[in-house]
Image (spheres, helix red, strand yellow):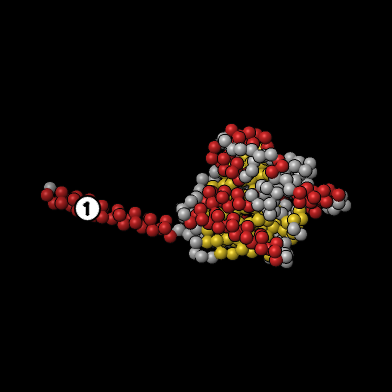
Amino acid sequence: MKYISMFFIMFIALSCKDQPNQISKKNTNQKNQQFALVIHGGAGYIKDLPQDIEKVYREKLNEALETGYAVLERGGSATEAVRQTIKVMENSPLFNAGKGCVLNSLGKPELDASIMDGKTLNAGAVAGVSHIKNPIDAAVLVKDSTRHVLLSGKGAEEFCQSKGMKLVPESYFITEKRLRQLKQIQKKEHQTAKNHLSYIFNGIKKYGTVGCVALDKAGNIAAGTSTGGLMNKQFGRIGDSPIIGAGTYADNQTCGISCTGTGEYFIRTAASYSVSDLMKFKKMTLVKAQKQVIDRIEQLGGDGGMIGLDKNANIAWYFNTQGMFRAYKKSNGEKKIEMYH
């Protein structure tokens, strides 16, 4: 009996001794977890921009990138990093999201946005809103405060208002430059339908949707996308940006994706989900999966691009246009801001 008691005491002691080491190892792994953030500001026919215009875009892309990266660096969640990053671009008239967005055929703004949490697969989105200053905030609110994924139009706005979000007048989004662009497009009736899908801004023909994908220190991925849609679009039209699996998708097991381009084609191909699917079941790398999806979209007659980030902090983008505003920053020190092919 004496020996049994001594053995039991030694067992307890050894167990207690090992426990701190196990916790320490776990904390070390969390501490060493890579984190990263990648963004886009739209794809299109972007080539040889004047130096002053290129400088302005680079500065705004850098501001958005550093804003989201700072959230990750201080231990914030991937979803919060995505939200804060996209808000910077929504607040800038340089992009087709939030202030300065393109206008529909009636000369009014209709904005879409979505966000997805790769850990839980929970997602939120809004579509066709005209009075929400930052649609990405509304998407987060839908994700966190409802059992739904997508709310649209007046219903989305009334819901956000009921949760304390202040609405803004349509005039907040409308700029003189956008009004001129709309009138120019509407006068050119001889143009093909495809020519109406993008817009000219500072001499750049592009799809100005913005997006962000982040991987945080806890190993969670999130993705988000925000847009004003297509210039001179049929009022009530909704593109891929607020549709989970089309313009936005995130899954911790595979990747996070945000898209930009002719949205109808990204919807038809379930573009963002297809990348995740190819990685999961075909064991493709992120960039190979992106290429296969964009090539399929091109075969169908669409164009655009996408950014992505996988669970190992590998970053990739792929597009079939002349350029795409894009940038990334990783915890290992890598950073890039690019525009052209």
Q: Position of residue 123 (x, y in %)?
A: 57, 44
Q: Position of residue 171 (x, y in %)?
A: 71, 42
Q: Quadrant of residue 160?
A: top right
Q: Quadrant of residue 60?
A: bottom right
Asked whether 52 or 34 is in front, the reply is 52
Q: Is residue 163 among what the camera can see?
A: yes
The residue drawn where x is 75% and y is 53% is 198
* Side of 326 relative to 199 (left or right): left
Asked whether 174 or 75 is in front, the reply is 174
Q: Which residue is mark 1?
A: 13
The residue drawn where x is 66% and y is 47% is 98
Q: Is residue 278 among what the camera can see?
A: no
Number of disc labels? 1
Asked whether 216 or 267 is in front, the reply is 216
Indicate the amino acid at tag 1: Ala
Up-down relation of residue 78 to residue 159 (above or below): below
Identify the secondary structure beneath mark 1: helix
Quarter of the image where the C terminus is located: bottom right
Q: Position of residue 28 (x, y in %)?
A: 38, 58
Up-down relation of residue 203 to residue 242 (above or below): below
The residue drawn where x is 28% and y is 55% is 18
Q: Position of residue 119 (x, y in %)?
A: 50, 48
